[in-house]
Amino acid sequence: MSQDELLTLRNLGKTSAQWLHATGIHNLDELERLGPVGAYTAVRARGFNASKALMFAIAGALQDIHWNDLDPHYKQQLLRQLEDESRP
């Protein structure tokens, strides 16, 4: 059995990886294509009770930094993008 690529990324644990797999995200390329907001939205749309910390964790994973070390302006940008995408 091959190693789960998502579990090798910083900030992502077993539950996060399972949620992402359930939405069809199985590797770094797919995660990069959707981005933090798209991946988080997909997880929520699948019915998982993920907090916004997952979105930040994904963003940190894509930058290979701990999510607490994300630039505060970038976090605000992600929140605005999430708000914009959730509007009808």
Image (cartoon, rainbow, N blue to C red):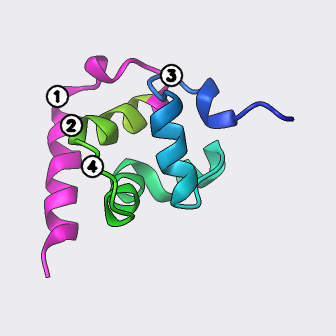
Within 10 angstroms of label 3, few (less than 14), some, or many (20 or more) residues? some
Q: Which residue is mark 3?
A: 10
The reply, left or right, for residue 21 in relation to residue 56 is: right
**First along the sequence among labels 4 and 1:** 4
The reply, left or right, for residue 52 in relation to residue 80 is: right
Q: Say what amino acid the circle numbered 2 marks.
A: Lys
For the residues marked 2 and 3, what is the alpha-carbon distance in whole angstroms? Answer: 17 Å
Q: Say what amino acid the circle numbered 1 marks.
A: Pro
* Foreground residue among 59 and 52: 52
* Foreground residue among 37 and 19: 19
**First along the sequence among labels 4 and 2:** 4
Tag of residue 72: 1
Under circle 3, the secondary element is: loop
Within 10 angstroms of label 2, few (less than 14), some, or many (20 or more) residues? some
Rendered position, 74 above or below 79: above
Q: Which residue is mark 4?
A: 49
For the residues marked 1 and 2, what is the alpha-carbon distance in whole angstroms? Answer: 5 Å
Work out which quarter of the rendered image holds the C terminus and state it.
bottom left
**First along the sequence among labels 3 and 1:** 3
Image location (x, y in percent) of residue 33: 54, 57
